[in-house]
Image: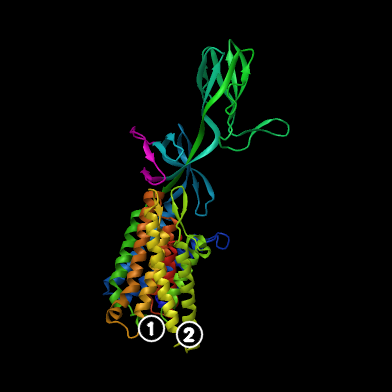
Amino acid sequence: MSVLARPGVLASLLAASALVLHPSTFSPRWMPGRFAVLAALLALAALGLLARLSARMRSAAAWLSAAGAAVLLAALGVDGLRGHHGTLAILSGEARPHFDEAGPDGRTLGLRPLGFVVGAERILDSGVVFLRLPGGGPPVELTPERSVSFGGLRFARPRAVATGGASRLRVAASDGVRTVTADVAPGAPGRALDLTIALEEYFPDFALDDKQRPYSRSSEARNPAALLAVEKGGQTHRAFVLKAMPGVHRVEPLGFTFSLLEVAPERRAEIAVHREPAALVVLLGAVLLAVGVALSWPSLPALPAAAVGGDPDAPVLPGGALALLLAAVDRGSVLAWSFDLAVDGGRVPLAGVGVLLGAALILALGGTLLLAAARLAGEGAGSRPLARGALWLAVLLAGAALALALARMAALPAGPATALPLAGVGFAAAVLAGALVASRTPSLTFVSRAAPLVLPLGVVAAIGLAVVAGVAGVWRDGTYATPAAAASAAAALLGLGALEPTGAPGLRRFAFLLALLALAIV
């Protein structure tokens, strides 16, 4: 136990946990037992925090941090053992008492009872499903933006999938004098005068193969057609109708021409189902951990002088972080001097923003490399002012790009827009500006006093982001185990590791900064 409490060991365990947890570094191919490895690493890290209590019995912050870590880990273990995740596939008008359960690696585990019967009264093209739940109340609207809780389960993220069938066809029958319509559904024939019209076969995307046999090219209703069975006076005749050719399908023995007027495609709703009985305890553990870290900052070792002031090379890491973020944001579009904003229905280019961000990328990269070369050479008095000037110019250009982006966004049509990448760029530029101010010579008094607070407050902020992402995930996705929550938790783990008074502090702080910035592109 005492070995686990050593700063170097604990920092390594936390960093390894973050690496396994972060969604961008995980691949089932190189780590098939990812969740077992993650559980073991987190358990060892929690034991290390608990072992420290023997040396800090009177520290409330240590107790809170260790208790929060233990409660969080125990709750995650309960959800891992007793929780269930899967998919409910249901047709409109259908009721299901079970769902398809999936394991941690996504493999199907078979059907699992819901404990009650849930029905889908209506499924919209947008994915909205009106669920019929036990109790006899009105249908509950389930949308892709808001989950529904019932019976200890959460239903979330519905999406409508075309099955290739039709829930209803509207067919017209005309004898040249009269035209009547009938609604025909699978297993439910329609009536038109003295005709009984039944659906025999439906082709959503009708085509003929090389042997002139009908088939459907896809499950989408692009060229709908149907083969009908029309009964009159005890005799049944076949009628073929193609929506693209109305009024030309005539059955001579009946004296009627048939047309396909409308098609209501059959849609299946695929709904995510989650059961996490210890979700509230997970939230409690995260809050306790955040409070413990926040209270522990007075006893944490102060940042070294190089990070506070007097070292003109200190902005190397923040400058490199800004350059990396600009190179990765918006799928690398800044490298092509462009920048797009994600909005409902697609992406909208922001004219001029990509040019400013591209110039900021070049200046940030150039200034960072100049400072790194000066530090390695040991004699960079002549190049350091130029490098720092390039970094300041990069900050200014990034700020100008953000201002221009806000102006462009204000002119866009109303609709939700994803501005998280812009927030990440703003945060990275602010960190670089702070590093440039903090590393000036002579150092400022308020900077020296505020510097020890930066890292612990950043860790508390990362834990807070993980909590917010988890709560938002439960509200929208039905589970706190979302990529955003995992990325935020990985950043918090790296931050906790950066707090440890052991070797390579600059590298650990840089990894923490990169993880925070990566939240903008997850």
In the picture of the structure, the residue carrying the numbered disc 2 is 374
Q: Is residue 207 magenta?
A: no
What segment carries the magenta color? Answer: 132-155
Q: Is residue 146 magenta?
A: yes
Tell me: 344 left or right of 54.
Answer: right
Residue 11 in sight from this viewpoint? no
In the picture of the structure, the residue carrying the numbered disc 1 is 306
The three-letter amino acid code for the residue at tag 1 is Ala
Residue 506: name its quadrant.
bottom left
Q: In this view, which residue lies farthest toward the top?
A: 233
Residue 8: name its quadrant.
bottom left
Of residues 223 and 455, the one nearer the viewer is: 223
Q: Estimate the x, y position of residue 53 in percent, counting from the top left.
A: 32, 73
Q: Estimate the x, y position of residue 485 in percent, counting from the top left.
A: 41, 58
Up-down: is 440 above or below 279?
below
The three-letter amino acid code for the residue at tag 2 is Ala
Q: CA distance from mark 2 to mark 1?
A: 15 Å
Residue visible at 55% across and 32% down in the picture:
165
Tell me: 189 left or right of 453.
Answer: right
Residue visible at 40% across and 59% down in the picture:
420
* Label 1 secondary element: helix
Of residues 87 and 311, the one nearer the viewer is: 311
* Label 2 secondary element: helix
Residue 106 in sight from this viewpoint? yes
Q: Estimate the x, y position of residue 310 in percent, counting from the top left.
A: 36, 85
Camera-near label (2 vs 1) is: 2
